[in-house]
Amino acid sequence: MIKRHTPIARRTLLRGMGMSLGLPWLEAMAATTPHGAPPVRFAALYVPNGMREDVWTPAETGRNFTLTPTLEPLADLKQDLLVLTNLWNQGSVGGDGHYVKISGWLTSTTVTKTLGVDINCNGISVDQVAAKVAGRHTPLASLELGVAPVTTGVDKNVGYTRVYGSHIAWSGPTTPLAREVNPHLVFERLFHAGSQNTDSATQDRQLLDGVLDDAKQLRGKLGAADKVRLDEYLSVVRGLEDRLSRAARPQQTPWKPLVALNPKDKPAAQPKDFADHVRLMMDMIALGFQSDTTRIATFMFGNEVTNQNFAFVDGVKGGHHSISHHENNPESLRQYLLISRWHVAQFAYLCSKLKAMKEGEGTVLDNSAILFGSGIRDGNKHDPHNLPLLVGGRGGGRINSGQHLSYGKDTPLANLYVSLLDALGAPVERFADSTGPLPGVLA
């Protein structure tokens, strides 16, 4: 399958992505909104395989809470932080241990159980609801990032396509958005964003159409199993079409960056080191936000069920997924804590970087809402209750940060999304199974 499929469809598509999504980028002290206020940004950072649950939740609620061992990397950001307890996604109950939890994390819906041909999350992710509003003002409506390619095939243990484990951003029920995993290419997209030359985008759309036509012809030559794999891949590819159409249309109000970025800052190549890879992606989000090239981003630390080796963390020996199935073994729990802390430290890195970027009388972090968490609480139990969730930033002054907020058992996660959309200037009356805004979140 790899030899027959890759040269025809995948490589051609990647060239198309390099052209079509390489729209200009210049670094800027972020542009303001039409009303003169700085823009408000949103990012969602997803951690696979849950967290070490017994050392996650602070004992105290309100403002005078003590950071737990897992949250200690956030000591310098405590006043910019919301810790949220007892939220869950009811739509993720049942199904399997992982895939239903991840694909529904930002949609608060139940994904359709399938082997791959008819993937459906039955909703739209909260980032894309925000992007429909924020994207009117920026060259890139949103940025979807990861560190690992999409996983295809079927997890025979649970009967779900592995494609579900590779996506949190959905522009529609059947359209997961393609992620970029190469920071070098992300930089190029940002650097070129804002170009008023629409000819390239039009050509790229034609190239993508050609890719899809080639894929249709190839499909007729494949066996049943390979057809499923190809369909899984194409379901992701189609997520590019809407963005290519948008890029081909000139903006009514041209985007005007203020300060040019030095092209020499471009990452040299695809990093081989996982930790460096993650940091570079955090840097790309920060650059996109500071420049106002985009106001919406999602990032996945790994595909769900990833067994990424964390031996680069002192005291850890082994893969993430294996260690998350700790079975209450003290040594596994100790290593699970170190992996959880490492992920929190990367969230802290991004928030600190945004906090160091001055913007008017505040900072880019003051004008951002950075969601961090997982679709399961504990990797051993696959528990969707009381999800580990943090929000960094003040959302343009709308988020009442510096608190640990605890709610009644099984409060809808969608209530948080209603509140965040309000802060982002994209208010909705309801989102999925929401029952209203989440008390205490908004200032």
Image (cartoon, rainbow, N blue to C red):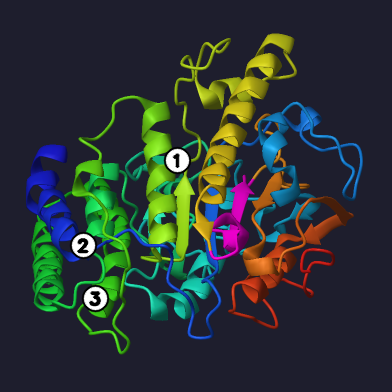
Q: Quadrant of the C terminus?
A: bottom right
- Is residue 355 visible in this depiction of the protein? yes
Q: How many marks?
A: 3
Structural distance between the alpha carbons of marks 3 and 2: 12 Å
User: Label 2 crowding class (10 Å Cα cut-off): few <14, some 14-19, many 20+?
Assistant: some
Q: Is residue 250 magenta?
A: no
Q: Amino acid at mark 1?
A: Asn
Residue marked by disc 1: 303
User: Label 3 crowding class (10 Å Cα cut-off): few <14, some 14-19, many 20+?
Assistant: many
Question: Measured from the top left, where is residue 258 in percent x and y?
Answer: 33, 67
Question: Measured from the top left, where is residue 81 in percent x and y?
Answer: 72, 49
Describe the element under mark 2 as helix, strand or loop: loop
Q: Quadrant of the N terminus?
A: top left
Residue marked by disc 3: 247
Q: Amino acid at mark 3?
A: Ala
Foreground: 290 or 120?
A: 290
Foreground: 215 or 387?
A: 387
Q: In the figure, residue 245 lies in which quadrant?
A: bottom left
Q: Residue furthest front?
A: 361
Quick one: label 3 or label 2, which is nearer the N terminus?
Answer: 2
Q: Is residue 374 magenta?
A: yes
Structural distance between the alpha carbons of marks 3 and 1: 28 Å
Give the numbered dot on residue 192: 2
Structural distance between the alpha carbons of marks 1 and 2: 28 Å
Q: Nearer the viewer, mark 3 or mark 1?
A: 3
Q: Amino acid at mark 2?
A: His
